[in-house]
Amino acid sequence: MSQGQVKYSPVTHGLYSVFSKVKAIDGRTKLGKAIRGLRKELVEHCGGEGRVSATQRLIIEQVISRAIRRQMYEVHILKDKEFSRESFLIALENGLSRDLNYLGIHAKEMEKVLDLESYIKSKEETKEATSQ
C-alpha cells in the first residue's frame, strides 16, 4: 500500500455488518424470497417487466435496500429497546417515502396481452358477427 492510502476494513460485526452483505443474499433464504417478492410486486406496480425503465429499476433496488434496512432497525430496536441513531432512521424513512413517490402511488394499468389462441378466437368472432 502506498503512502497516503487508507486501508479499508469492512465492519464484520453488529447491525452494520449485515448491510454490506445485502447484495450477496441467497435467494433461497426467507430474506431472499421476500426481496424477490417485493421486487416482483414493485415491477408489476410500474407496469410489468417489459415496461419498467432503467430509472425505475434503480429506484426499485433502492426501495428494496431501504426496506430491508428499515426492517433490520425495527428488529434491533424491539430487541434492545435502545437506539441512538433516530435521525438516521428518520432519514431512511424519508428516503423510502420519496422513492416510493417517484415510483408512483397509483398502479399503472398494464396493457392486456392476448395469447395467439385468444387473438384467433376474437378475430373469428368478429368475422362471424360481420357476416351475419
Image (tube, rainbow, N blue to C red):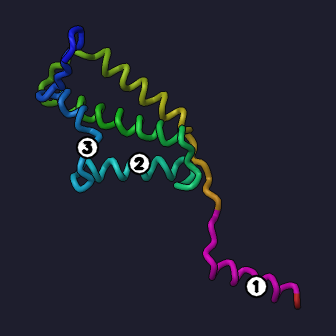
Mark 3, secondary structure of its residue: helix
Image: 4 above or below 103: above
Task: Decide which of 94, 57 is in the foreground and name it.
Answer: 57
Q: Position of residue 36 (x, y in %)?
A: 35, 52
Q: Residue at x 29, y 53 (%)?
A: 33
- Nearer the viewer's eye, disc 3 or disc 2? 3
Q: Residue at x 59, y 51 (%)?
A: 51
Mark 1 belongs to which amino acid? Glu
Look at the image and tell me in which quarter the N terminus lies.
top left
Task: Decide which of 27, 131 is in the foreground and name it.
Answer: 27
Q: Which residue is mark 3?
A: 24
In the rendered view, does 123 fall on the left or right side of 33? Answer: right
Residue 119 lies in the magenta stretch: yes
Residue 107 lies in the magenta stretch: no
In the rendered view, does 39 fall on the left or right side of 30? Answer: right
- Cβ atoms under marks 1 and 2 closer than 8 Å: no
Question: Is the residue marked by circle 1 packed among few (<14), some (14-19), or many (20+) residues within 10 Å?
Answer: few
Q: Which residue is mark 1?
A: 125
Mark 1, secondary structure of its residue: helix
Magenta-colored span: 112-130
Question: Could you tell me how far apart the alpha carbons at marks 3 and 1 are, in whole angstroms?
Answer: 52 Å
Mark 3 belongs to which amino acid? Ala
Find residue 39 and name its label.
2
Question: Could you tell me how far apart the alpha carbons at marks 3 and 2 are, in whole angstroms?
Answer: 16 Å
